[in-house]
Amino acid sequence: DESEEKKRSIRKWWQALPPDKQELLKDTVKRNRWRIVLGICSLSSLTAIYFWTHLDKSPITGRNRLLMFSKRQFLQLAEFEYQSVLENYKDKFLPVTDPMYETTQFVFNQLIEKNKDIPGVSETKWSINVVEDPEINAFVMPNGQVFVLTGLFKAIADSDQLACILGHEMAHCLLAHGAEHASIIQLLDFVSLVFLTLIWAVFPRDSLAVLGQWIQSKLIQYMFDRPYSRKLEIEADEVGLRLAAKACTDVRASSVYWQQLELMKIVSGTFQIPEWFSTHPSNDHRVEHLNKLIPKAIKLREDCGCPSLSSVDPRLVFRLSVQEMLKLSKKEESFSIDSGTKQLPQYHEPGTAIIERLPTVVSVQALQSTQNTHK
């Protein structure tokens, strides 16, 4: 690109200089090295002051974060993205009378109503959009536009899971994670520019410079950018769970949702990339983290005067359901062997088939016996 061409031009300009001119410039640099060092230090100090003055303390978590955009500036940038999303999903929006829209509206209204004391909730103009799309996804834009794709409804078990997911996405918006991540990207771009200038100026050949630039970009991506994205996701899980708890949601359903997604990946044979390659924590990591947060969320729920939770823990229901599924699979396998069937069964989308066979209701006797064994 243009920046690389400029860096390449600097190197070519230096190589084209006569040896006496090169020596003269080197001698000039040596004589003025302290002035150059002072200039670099001054520039570094000004840069550090600039970033220091753009640190902002989150009113929700109390964490200091880098925000290089004002709220107004970022909303203007987000408006362009919003228009792009509208264009992408045009003719796919469900009417307000659709049951999925009504469910989403009801759940989200509960989150708003019970969290008006949280900074940003009352000030944001929230709007629901339900889109006919098979992808399992939901997101909330910085301008308060909530998007839920219909594929999500095929992945959740109940409205409690939906509330936990929407609480998570709502938290991203309230915590200004979009602006924070954009600020971090700008900081990393600045650091990259310094290193790239050195790489293109020092390496003698273009091929080596390109290799050095690729290594540098991957190091920044996997050592800084993606870990920071995962950190923001974990924070949104924590704040989102509190939002859901205050809305009297059964917060125990939060970890079950991620277990369901993990099970769907396993039975469908979906390739799972290592966590450190991803911008999101792994499903297992999320389940473990949420289960640690759930006791505090339940206490918060009680403090808000919510009705008592059911004695049947949805996490236990899921575990028993999976056990029942495995038993059924073994029975079918044993039946095939006993009947002397030599032909292997045909492949018919195992992910969908197995998930549909998960029992939605587990007998009370089974629950009681399991609970008794854990007492």
Image (cartoon, helix red, strand yellow):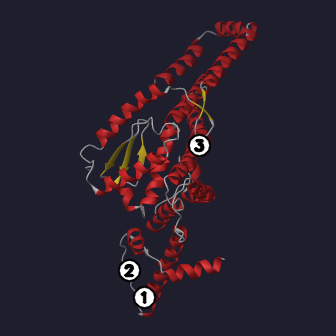
Residue in front for this viewpoint, 46 or 224: 46
The residue located at (61%, 9%) in the rendering is 18
Q: Is residue 246 placed above or below 189 in the rendered structure?
A: below
Query: Of helix, strand and loop, which one carries label 1?
Result: helix
- Name the residue that disc number 1 marks: 336
N-terminal of the pair, mark 1 or mark 3, is 3
Q: Identify residue type, mark 1.
A: Ser
Residue 99, percent from left and from top:
29, 57
Residue holding disc 3: 222
> Circle 2 sits on which residue?
345
Q: Badge 1: few (under 14), some or many (20 or more) residues near its Cα, within 10 Å?
A: some
**Distance between the Cα atoms at labels 2 and 3?**
42 Å
Q: Is residue 134 visible?
A: no
Instruction: Name the amino acid, label 3.
Output: Tyr
In this rendered view, identify the residue nearer to me: 43 or 131: 131
Point out residue 240 in the picture as x, y percentages from the top left corner. 52, 49
Q: Secondary structure at mark 2?
A: loop
Q: Is 282 situated left or right of 154 in this image?
A: right
Q: Which amino acid type is marked by label 2?
A: Pro
Disc 2 and disc 1 in contact, CB within 8 angstroms: yes
Q: Is residue 40 left or right of residue 172?
A: right
Give the x, y percent position of residue 28.
Answer: 71, 6
- First-in-chain label (2 vs 1): 1
Crowd rating for badge 2 (residues with CA inside 10 Å; few <14, some 14–19, many 20+): few
For residue 187, what is the image quadrant? top right
The residue that appears at 53% across and 59% down in the rendered structure is 251
